Image (spheres, coloured by chain):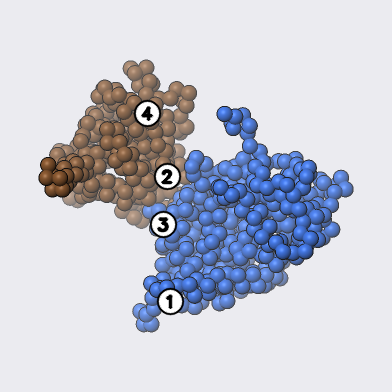
Amino acid sequence: MREQILKYFKQDKLPHVFCPGCGNGEVMHAMAQAIDELGWDPTQILIVGGIGCSSRIATYTIFDSLHTLHGRPVAFAVGAKLANPNLKVIIVSGDGDASSIGGNHLIHAARRNMDLTLFIVNNYTYGMTGGQYSPTTPLGSFTTTSPCGHVEEPFSITDLLVGAGAPFVARTGTLYFNELVKLMKLALAKNGFAAIDIFTQCPTNYGRNNRLGKPIDLIKTQASILVPKEKYDLLEPGDRVGKFARGVIQDVEKPTFLDHYRACILSTRKAVHHE
Amino acid sequence: MAIELIEGSLAIAHGAALCRPGVISAYPITPQTHIVEDLAKMVADGQLKTEFVNTESEFGAASVVLGALAGGSRAYTATTSQGLALMLEVLYNCAGMRLPLVMCCANRSLSAPLSIWSDQQDAMLMRDSGFIMGFAEDAQEALDLHIMGYKIAEDERVQLPYMVNVDGFLITHTFEPVNIPDQKLVDEYLGSYKPFQVLDPANPITMGCFTEPAYHMDVRYQMHKANLESTKVIEEVAASFEKKFGRPSGGLIRNYKLDDADTVVVAMGSITGLVEEAVDTLRGKGQKVGLLKIKTLRPFPTDKVREALSGKKHVVVMDRAMSAGYGEILGSEIKAALYGTPNPPAIDSFIYGLGGRDIHEDEIIGMINRPNPGTHRSEWVGLRPDLLEE
């Protein structure tokens, strides 16, 4: 098993730079396992990262990789996919990278239904710069820029993406590794924009700032936050506060940007050339 | 006044806080983060009464402070590198609207390749923006330039934003003894912010409005002229600051052992401390070497540079940034300043320290003592031949 996963990583770049107990390792492992189980050809995969701890995952894999600007991996990935629609394009981004500085690219890629797979490694903070609050930082929690407790409501990234029209949206956490692999396989195989909001632990910054204990304690908090979608749907609105559905949130079929674009080309040709 | 051994970022945060900005907005980016975190802590501890907003991007942060200034509040932000690049559209607007923002840039290289380390490439994005650009040598000057920055920016003859440039990590993450002025002195010195125009529903105006070709050039000229003429205000402020706070700081240029020097090194930012050591070493060997520190890059202190370098035999300009496809930046500005002056010195220019590449005293001495003075243009110092071989 170990060899099967390791073959997807540049061995000379390991060990990685992530802090002990960080969830990025689990996400990397799950992604490699999902790709392996799908039997994909690694030479046909492009992995795109932005700036942030999780975005560094892209630099460790053996796939072609594009390490882009902060907030822009989705936009760069759109360009790469348009240039070579045969590529399998995977984006690894964080809560800050994807939903804050890059939020605009995120919603528009979802709206256009670009055929991309996005893994958002959501640790509720900017880990790389030392633990400032991000758009998913829970209300009242402590970060270096909210030392008295955070005064803003967080995003539900899945609600945002469902609202923007993404055909496949899911959520889970590093606590649920097998579910993560399963959801990643679904997202990768999806024809269209597919995103997973992956709750993960940042023991170095978010965990310490909120005195949440060891990495394992931090991971365990996911059990009280993440509720299976079927159960979450039955909760009264008041009981949903501070909780998030996990599992497949949305899975619908709809034509992608490229489907519409190809249809447009064909119909124009027909009209112009009377084909 | 109290002298404390503190990190450069905390000195900068003190500098900003002492000026009592009504709104602070920023987005985290290395190596600026400590500055904003220190300010957030001051707000949380009740030491600083301000509206503090950590936005969704640098673009948002720059927009928030622009709005705050337009609404009549003193405002502050800090960033670096990619964050500065993202702010650029707003910052050019800020200068064009003549809003006296003070911002700090923890100077860092620009991508790609990605590097978080120090050079002054990011600052050069701002060279043509209309901002007044000061460069600090150390943590003390970084603090002082914030106070002087507001004084200059808000002067009715200027009304332009001010950018405090500090070398990332080299100043932001090192500890130095810093003299933190009393709040009372700063209050007396700065006074409260009196905007010369403000958004007010009772007396509505439009800022940043559309200009047709019949108006645009003239408005841009006024901004350029105000920037050029701020040299006078910058000198006045440096003098009044020294009188009030008891130490020389900022200004347009500063000299080190320049008067009798035959050879003069021109540099800006934290490197000038090391150049002083090189000057002393060479003077110990009987070589007449001096240093000209560029403290203000915009407005460019042309007259002062001419005066300082007049009659010198040899000038060595050190650039911690480069113009791809041309080379030197500060070097070409020094040459342009000396063009047409009688008996100009031989000028050499060197590019050093990009992306945090270390530079040592012997390398600076090497630049000064290169054979054939006047034949070295945009020479890169400290390149690694092992990486460049095909």
Q: Amino acid at mark 4?
A: Phe
Distance from the alpha carbon under mark 1 to that under mark 3: 30 Å
Q: Amino acid at mark 2?
A: Leu
- Residue A63: mark in rendering: 4
Give above or below for B167 relative to A190: below
* Residue positioned most to the bottom: B203
Helix, strand or loop at mark 1: helix
* Residue positioned most to the left: A274
Distance from the alpha carbon under mark 3 to that under mark 4: 32 Å
Image coords of residue B102 (percent x, y): 53, 64
Image coords of residue B349 (percent x, y): 69, 49
The residue where tag 3 is placed is B59
Q: Earlier in the sequence, mark 4 or mark 2?
A: 4
The structure residue drawn at horizontal position 43% and vertical position 25%, both measured from the top left corner, is A10
Q: Between tags 2 and 1, which lies in front? A: 1
A167 and A227: which one is in front?
A167
Image coords of residue B196 (percent x, y): 49, 78
